[in-house]
Image (cartoon, helix red, strand yellow):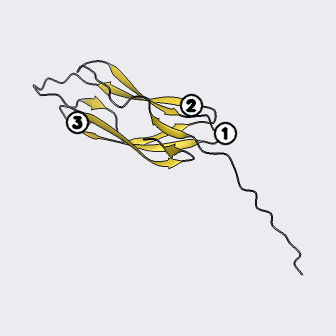
Amino acid sequence: MNAIHLVEITDDDVAPTIEFSQVVSSVVEGTPQLSVFLELTESSERIITVDYVVSGTATAAPDVNQDHKLESGTFTFMPGETSGSLDIIVEDDASQEGTEYITLDIANPQNVFLGT
């Protein structure tokens, strides 16, 4: 006979989904700041984190001719929050160049599902 009995209670709350509020943004070089918004489909009682990776043809610090100031990192939603922004400082470099692009990818979701 056993002296201990364990009861497992499975959480039935569905994690929210995270995605960018817009797929594409456009800005003119020298615009002080561009905010790219991340949104959750619903609030959560848990801390939510997602990594974001910055890539593309536009260069970031410490490049001498940097186009923007935003490095890859981790974005955090505190319990109850449903939106937040990645703020990109857009530089007005002196280089004559064509249109450049910044790509933001989100990955490694914690307590959240990735949207489409």
Q: Are dots 2 and 1 in contact, CB under 8 Å?
A: no
Residue type beneath disc 2: Thr
Q: Position of residue 17 (x, y in %)?
A: 53, 40
Q: Earlier in the sequence, mark 2 or mark 1?
A: 1
What residue is shown at x 24% (from left), y 19% (from top)?
Answer: 28
Q: Secondary structure at mark 2?
A: loop
| Residue sitting nearer the eye, 92 or 4 | 4
What residue is shown at x 17% (from left), y 28% (from top)?
Answer: 99
- Marks 2/3: CA distance? 30 Å
Q: Secondary structure at mark 3?
A: loop
Location of the C terminus by quadrant is top left
Q: Which residue is mark 1?
A: 45
Q: Earlier in the sequence, mark 2 or mark 3?
A: 3
| Residue sitting nearer the eye, 87 or 82 | 82
Q: Mark 2 against mark 3, which lies toward the viewer?
A: 2
Q: Earlier in the sequence, mark 1 or mark 3?
A: 1
Q: Residue furthest left?
A: 96
